[in-house]
Image (cartoon, coloured by chain):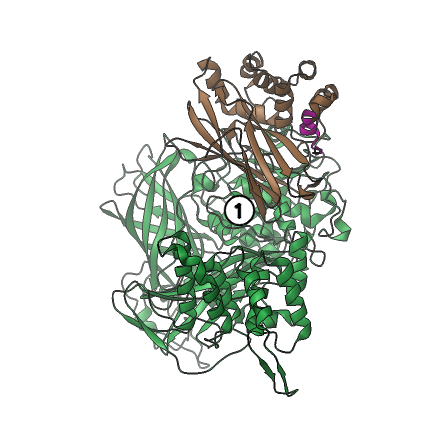
């Protein structure tokens, strides 16, 4: 953190002018109380120091200095996203010839969105959902708090309460002047200098497509006054960077002026059909209050909602043609290039909740939500919402309206997105899919997340203007069949995607979806991606302390997952040659935290492995979408595996003296051995019943039951590949029991399958099973 | 494997069947297909959203040497889940238009295409149909084929109403010798009487069911007029496609 100590000792070294050139040598003078004397003695605006990194966060107007008076005027929007562990940069540049040539570069006239009068539907004071997360330093927190106030105070009240917010604006230029898009491909920020490796995508104005790329370097210096007046911490002329852009064989001076601590802005005009209610605010599941503005603020968008007409004549059923006509007739004419969207609160269109109806030659300018359609009477819908028209359930209707507006910004349903981000409870999931995560205990709309997924948030902030801006490229350009879009910006080096050791790669593979109560396993692999041999631990399991899973449930808390039983001992190692891996399968169903996936919604799991005493590596997180059990079979499985004692038995590979757990496991195995969960139960029984068990406390011995064990082993192996059977066997065995009978027993039972020879499919399957078992009993690099 | 007669894939007691209305269709005609979800393993509660509007049904179209594209509605929608109870052997039947991917024509050129349907029948469970072949032949009327590629015309057909400057093209399509194509155009032009008079033709019923899918679209006089003429037992499938009610075995 960069502190302004005021002691004067560091000041001489930090005396730069606003442009970072030359040095200011004026002495600092302090009064009798040790306070810096500001005034005629010094010029504090000339005393500068590097900006904290958080200062960079937000929207900037980027201008290239014209090389000659005949050169084109090039300027555009630059977005710098500073996260807790990431920094991404993107921008959209526009150029035009200026005739007659002018001697001085034209300074753009800031064009803030007009702050509207509160509309007839406004007035609800919102609060709760906190928008843009701030950076780690004081300045960014200040800006984040400021943005938070804006989001929390409601759409129009914010501007009234914070007049300086009127200075926020978002550079927007005619689409006909669009020239290129750029994104970061790595960056550094040190000593107040931001150096960004950029990839530039050149735009063909005739074809309206990106046609070629080149690379360059954008360097910007950010200094701020050593002495900062309180008012100057808000957006002001001091928030300016200067530097150079080196690309295409030329070096050009550039200036960046901060326009907002948020990234993009849009004016949303809301018109409503008579007797239909626009949800100006809604209480969401967390108890917070959300608005259209506050939800978009979570993605760094500065949305101004203007409620205009509320008496659009009634029409009980609306076709898309009628919606298009309504937009033409009722949308306000707003001058300028600011982004805008028309959002209509209409009656109905069949059973639809909403639609983005505008995909014509000037597409994505209008979307609609339907107030009259009723929610169902299902148990997973909140009792107060069942059978109600959508506009009588503000949270549900608000979600749909924000969702439809998201389509207008070219976001797709996750399940239809070519990037396969996975379904969940976030805004761009269809309501039907969000309802899929609801239960009677956590019903819709309370279970819905009023945030955008990371994938959609990144798109909203960093995708090119033609993709995002309403009225430009058609729906589907960027996420759908029309194009997959351009890659997202890359994090600044050393902040994002830090895996701990560049020479080692840790990966974790898990199913993308699971239902509550399903037995879930993961494969963890450590690979030497360097060109030198590496000595690494072989304890790729959750029982012996080297491996831990970092689990984030839908409530975004963080859990460290390890096994219910932890063993201690020396760390065996193996030498991994370049390209070799050591791997293992582990169960994630039941850990020290109990059943892992009890909550429907999106979970993430990342692995962290202590490779040696000095090296810890981390995997990229994987996403697991957890839903409630759907079929009768799943409900029954869930009921059984969530029975107290069963999870622990599955984690230990033995029911010990718990006769109740044994009974449930027996039913699970007998009734559901066609599923992996049932097979896992059978394998636990096979493992336990193969051997005796001494109950020290009761001074009793549980006898082995080899016939029963063989029966359950048969159940587990039946209809299952040898490899999968072995994977399940090694996960039910306790990792500290390398000689667990279920592993050896499984391999022995599978061996007859390989009679066809090593080259047969069955032989290869058996060989894979042997490798899985060997990874458990005697891990080695391969 | 491609076989228009053996067009099912079993999965979890459900079968999905996709069958184009014709194996070969010129490019100046609208293609429709029948879709069926059959409960082969006993009674089943399944999604009733067997249509292209709501996104549960996906049909991928792969042409030789071309990137596969999905048949999609031009406009993304949000809706609630709807389910229907199928008795053992019961069928949920529907018709779909194979016109566009978004607002872009689905079939770019004459050729042989492979169609693969997938339906999210239940939460977490998708059923795939066996791929089927469809041949798009050169148009009999190239000018008409060009009009079918126009954005306003595509959207008018799929939106069942005139959008933009599509009316003249729709008039030409309404005169098509192909009953399904003509019905689609007449639907957009709002000619309820014409549709009702032709309701005995399965191609007309299929077009109306495909472009006004029950559940996804609201009450509609045009669909009601056609449905009122489809009463004979022999047309039970047509009635089911228009109403969304399942068929017994």
- Of residues A311 and A705, the one drawn nearer to the viewer in this rendering: A705
In the picture, measured across the screen, residue B60 lies left or right of residue A115, that is left
Residue B242 magenta-drawn? yes
In the picture, measured across the screen, residue A764 lies left or right of residue B123, that is left
Q: Is residue A385 above or below residue A363?
A: below
Q: Is residue A522 in sight in this rendering?
A: no
Q: Which residue is mark 1?
A: A414
Where residue A198 appears, as percent x and y from the top left, is 32, 51
Where residue A178 appears, as percent x and y from the top left, is 38, 37
The quarter holding residue B199 reads top right
Q: Is residue B24 above or below residue A751?
A: above
In the picture, measured across the screen, residue A526 lies left or right of residue B78, that is left
Residue extending furthest left? A249
The chain coloured brown carries which letter?
Answer: B
**Which image quarter holds the N terminus of chain A?**
bottom left
- Of residues A303 and B174, the one drawn nearer to the viewer in this rendering: B174
Secondary structure of the residue carrying numbered label 1: helix
Q: Is residue A572 above or below residue A519?
A: below
Residue B90 magenta-drawn? no
Look at 70% across and 51% down and name the residue there: A124
Where residue A71 appears, as percent x and y from the top left, is 28, 38
**Which image quarter holds the C terminus of chain A?**
bottom left
Q: Which residues are magenta?
A: B237-249
For chain A, give the colour: green
Circle 1 chain: A
């Amino acid at each position: 953190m960069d502190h302004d100590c005021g002691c004067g000792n560091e000041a001489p070294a930090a005396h730069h002018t606003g442009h970072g050139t030359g040095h200011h040598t004026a002495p600092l003078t302090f009064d009798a109380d040790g306070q810096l004397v500001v005034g005629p003695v010094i010029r504090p605006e000339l005393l500068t120091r590097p900006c904290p990194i958080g200062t960079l966060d937000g929207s900037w107007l980027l201008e290239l200095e014209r090389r000659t008076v005949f050169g084109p005027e090039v300027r555009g929007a630059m977005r710098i996203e500073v996260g807790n562990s990431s920094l991404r940069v993107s921008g959209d540049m526009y150029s035009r010839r200026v005739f007659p040539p002018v001697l001085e570069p034209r300074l753009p006239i800031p064009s803030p969105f007009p702050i509207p009068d509160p509309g007839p539907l406004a007035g609800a004071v919102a609060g709760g959902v906190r928008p843009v997360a701030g950076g780690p330093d004081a300045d960014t927190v200040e800006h984040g708090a400021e943005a938070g106030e804006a989001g929390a105070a409601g759409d129009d009240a914010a501007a009234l309460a914070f007049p300086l917010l009127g200075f926020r604006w978002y550079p927007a230029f005619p689409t006909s002047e669009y020239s290129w898009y750029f994104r970061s491909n790595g960056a550094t920020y040190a000593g107040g200098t931001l150096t960004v490796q950029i990839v530039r995508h050149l735009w063909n104005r005739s074809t309206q497509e990106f046609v070629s790329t080149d690379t360059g370097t954008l360097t910007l210096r950010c200094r701020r006054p050593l002495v900062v007046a309180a008012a100057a911490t808000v957006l002001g002329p001091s928030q300016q960077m200067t530097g150079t852009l080196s690309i295409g064989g030329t070096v050009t001076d550039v200036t960046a002026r901060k326009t907002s601590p948020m990234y993009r802005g849009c004016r949303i005009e809301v018109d409503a059909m008579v007797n239909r209610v626009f949800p100006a605010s809604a209480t969401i599941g967390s108890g917070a209050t959300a608005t259209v503005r506050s939800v978009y603020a979570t993605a760094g968008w500065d949305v101004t909602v203007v409620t205009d007409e509320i008496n659009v004549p009634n029409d009980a059923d609306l076709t898309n043609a009628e919606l298009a006509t309504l937009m033409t007739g009722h949308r306000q004419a707003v001058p300028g290039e600011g982004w805008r969207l028309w959002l209509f609160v209409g009656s109905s269109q069949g059973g639809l909740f909403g639609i983005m109806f505008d995909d014509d030659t000037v597409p994505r300018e209008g979307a609609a939500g339907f107030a009259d359609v009723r929610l169902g009477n299902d148990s997973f819908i909140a009792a107060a919402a069942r059978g109600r028209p959508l506009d009588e359930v503000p949270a549900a209707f608000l979600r749909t309206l924000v969702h439809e507006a998201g389509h207008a910004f070219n976001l797709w349903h996750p399940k239809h997105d070519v990037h396969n981000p996975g379904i969940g409870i976030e805004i761009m999931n269809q309501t039907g899919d969000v309802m899929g995560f609801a239960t009677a205990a956590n019903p819709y709309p309370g279970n819905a997340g009023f945030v955008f997924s990371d994938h959609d948030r990144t798109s909203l902030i960093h995708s090119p203007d033609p993709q995002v801006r309403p009225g430009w490229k058609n729906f589907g350009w960027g996420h759908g069949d029309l194009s997959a879009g351009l890659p997202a910006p890359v994090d600044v080096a050393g902040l994002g995607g830090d895996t701990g050791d560049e020479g080692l790669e840790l990966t974790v593979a898990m199913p993308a979806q699971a239902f509550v109560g399903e037995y879930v396993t993961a494969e963890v692999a450590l690979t030497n991606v360097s060109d030198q041999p590496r000595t690494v631990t072989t304890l790729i399991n959750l029982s012996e302390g080297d491996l831990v899973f970092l689990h984030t449930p839908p409530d975004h808390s963080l859990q460290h997952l390890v096994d219910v039983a932890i063993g201690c001992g020396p760390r065996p190692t193996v030498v991994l040659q370049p390209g070799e891996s050591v791997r293992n399968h582990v169960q994630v169903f039941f850990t020290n935290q109990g059943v892992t996936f009890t909550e429907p919604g999106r979970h993430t799991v990342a692995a962290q492995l202590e490779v040696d005493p000095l090296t810890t590596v981390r995997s990229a997180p994987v996403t697991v979408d957890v839903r409630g059990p759907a079929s009768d079979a799943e409900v029954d499985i869930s009921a059984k595996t969530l029975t107290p004692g069963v999870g622990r038995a599955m984690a230990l590979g033995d029911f010990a003296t718990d006769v109740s757990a044994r009974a449930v496991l027996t039913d699970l195995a007998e009734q559901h051995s066609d599923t992996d969960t049932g097979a896992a139960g059978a394998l636990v029984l096979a493992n336990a019943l193969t051997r005796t068990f001494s109950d020290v406390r009761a001074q009793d011995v549980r006898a082995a039951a080899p016939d029963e064990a063989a029966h359950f082993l048969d159940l587990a192996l039946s209809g299952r590949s040898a490899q999968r059977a072995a994977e399940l066997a090694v996960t039910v065995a306790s990792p500290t029991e390398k000689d667990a009978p279920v592993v050896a027993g499984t391999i022995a039972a599978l061996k007859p399958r390989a009679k066809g020879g090593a080259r047969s499919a069955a032989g290869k399957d058996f060989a894979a099973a042997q490798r899985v078992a060997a990874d458990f009993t005697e891990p080695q690099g391969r | 494997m491609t076989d228009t007669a053996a067009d099912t894939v079993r999965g979890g007691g459900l079968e999905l069947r996709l069958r184009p209305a014709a194996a070969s269709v010129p490019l100046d005609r609208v293609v429709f297909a029948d879709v069926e979800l059959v409960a082969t393993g006993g009674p089943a509660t399944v999604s009733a959203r067997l249509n292209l509007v709501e996104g549960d049904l996906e049909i991928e179209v792969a042409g030789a040497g071309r990137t596969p594209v999905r048949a999609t509605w031009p406009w993304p929608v949000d809706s609630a889940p709807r389910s229907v109870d199928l008795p053992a052997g019961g069928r949920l039947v529907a018709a779909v238009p194979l016109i566009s991917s978004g607002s872009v024509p689905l079939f770019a050129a004459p050729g042989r295409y492979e169609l693969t349907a997938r339906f999210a029948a239940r939460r977490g469970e998708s059923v795939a149909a066996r791929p089927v072949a469809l041949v798009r032949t050169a148009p009999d009327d190239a000018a008409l084929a060009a009009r079918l590629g126009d954005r306003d015309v595509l959207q008018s057909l799929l939106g069942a109403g005139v959008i933009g400057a599509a009316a003249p093209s729709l008039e030409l399509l309404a005169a098509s010798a192909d009953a399904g194509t003509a019905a689609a155009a007449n639907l957009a032009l709002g000619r309820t009487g014409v549709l009702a008079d032709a309701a005995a033709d399965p191609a007309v019923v299929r077009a109306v069911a495909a472009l006004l899918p029950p559940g996804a679209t609201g009450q509609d006089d045009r669909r009601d007029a056609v449905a009122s003429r489809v009463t004979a037992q022999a047309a039970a499938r047509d009635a089911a496609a228009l109403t969304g009610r399942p068929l017994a075995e």
